[in-house]
Image: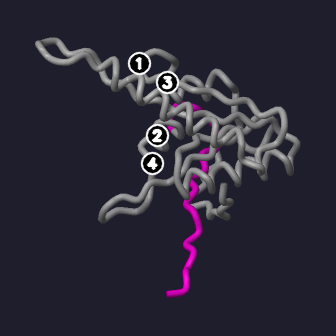
Amino acid sequence: MRHVAGTVVEARPGGGLGSHVAVLFERGRHGQAALSQAAALAAESGAELSVVVLAPQVGRYHRCGESPDALNCALIDASRSELTDAAHDRSVPDGTRFTLLLEGHDPSLVAWVKEGGFDVVFVPSRPRLFRAPGHPAVRSLRRLAGCEVRLVAASRSRQAP
């Protein structure tokens, strides 16, 4: 697995550095950068690191049609694969906790962060057309979770032609 140095796009204080660090992991450069930065902070400060992956779920159809169960199983398998990738990352310290949250079944990301008492949460940025990079979870985390949220983008690497 390739390690990517990242850049914190935006960090707003809300809690401060403490003993609990969380990272929302998503496959890709930005997710890898967020994981690397969270692992580095946890190692540097001696904090506990928790990695969470969200598994989206499709709701039940109310009319005739195929059951979404097969799609939901595929989404869970893909999310478990992401969690396994994060667990095998060399930058992740021993003792890291890994969690898979099923949308609609488990607590929301905000509730999980509040319940875990995290001081800092790293979130990978997502490119957005005609807007600055962001992530849909950032606003609700900042508003409701009461912790510092760091939006992380992977550094751009230039390759020779």
Q: Which residues are magenta?
A: 143-161
Q: Identify the element where label 4 is drawn.
A: loop
Tell me the residue at 70%/54% (across/down): 37
Query: What residue is pinned by disc 2?
Result: 137
Amino acid type indicated by mark 1: Gly
Classify 10 Å Cα crowding around label 1: few (below 14), some (14-19), many (20 and above).
Answer: few
Q: Identify the element where label 1 is drawn.
A: loop
Tell me the residue at 66%/54% (across/down): 1
Q: CA distance from mark 2 to mark 4?
A: 6 Å
Q: Identify the element where label 2 is drawn.
A: loop
Mark 2 touches mark 4? (CB < 8 Å): yes
Amino acid type indicated by mark 4: His
> Can you tell which mark lies on residue 104?
1
| Residue 98, horizontal then vertical, whole percent | 68, 30
Q: Nearer the viewer, residue 98 or 140?
A: 98
> Can you tell which mark lies on residue 108?
3
Total numbered circles: 4
Nearer-N-terminus badge (4/1): 1
Mark 1 touches mark 2? (CB < 8 Å): no
Amino acid type indicated by mark 3: Ser
Q: Is residue 94 above or below residue 32?
A: above
Query: What residue is pinned by disc 4?
Result: 135
